[in-house]
Image (cartoon, rainbow, N blue to C red):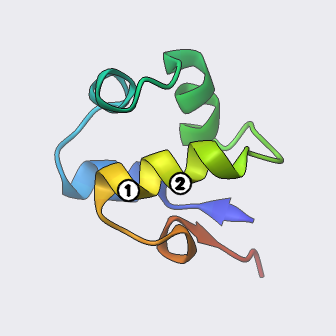
Amino acid sequence: MKNNLRVLLAKKRQKVSDLAKETGLSKSALTALYYERTKHPDIGTLRKIADYLGVTIDELLTPEE
């Protein structure tokens, strides 16, 4: 799976640190997700991110081709 976190944050002119503050998730976990170093992100983490960004989990993640 490929995540669109980088694109979604850029559209909203937000930083990983803003996302960490607002969601209560660790900055290190979000940074790993941002740079696509996380292979199996937790569904709770994805849900918090998607809720904050106002998108669905499907919009946050896309299958790799």
Kindly identify the residue that appears in the image at 17 percent across and 45 percent down.
Answer: 13
Q: Distance between the Cα atoms at labels 2 and 1?
A: 6 Å
**Circle 2 crowding by C-alpha within 10 Å: few under 14, some 14–19, many from 20:** some
Amino acid beneath label 1: Asp
Q: How many labels does the image show?
A: 2
Q: What element carries label 2?
A: helix
- Residue situated in front as seen by the camera: 53 or 10: 53
Kindly identify the residue that appears in the image at 49 percent across and 18 percent down.
Answer: 27
Kindly identify the residue that appears in the image at 59 percent across and 42 percent down.
Answer: 45
- Looking at the picture, how far across and down is residue 8, in whole percent? 34, 58
Q: Is residue 52 left or right of residue 3?
A: left
Label 2 with label 1: CB-CB less than 8 Å: yes
Q: In this view, does 15 lie above or below 52?
A: above
- Looking at the picture, how far across and down is residue 11, in whole percent? 22, 58
- Looking at the picture, how far across and down is residue 50, in whole percent? 43, 57
Amino acid beneath label 2: Arg
Q: Say which quadrant the N terminus sits in.
A: bottom right
Q: Say which quadrant the C terminus sits in.
A: bottom right
Using the rendered view, name the quadrant where residue 2 is placed.
Answer: bottom right
**Circle 1 crowding by C-alpha within 10 Å: few under 14, some 14–19, many from 20:** few
Q: What element carries label 1?
A: helix
- Looking at the picture, how far across and down is residue 43, in whole percent? 69, 52
The outermost residue toward the right is: 39
The tag on residue 11 is none
The tag on residue 47 is 2
The tag on residue 51 is 1
Q: Is residue 45 left or right of residue 40?
A: left
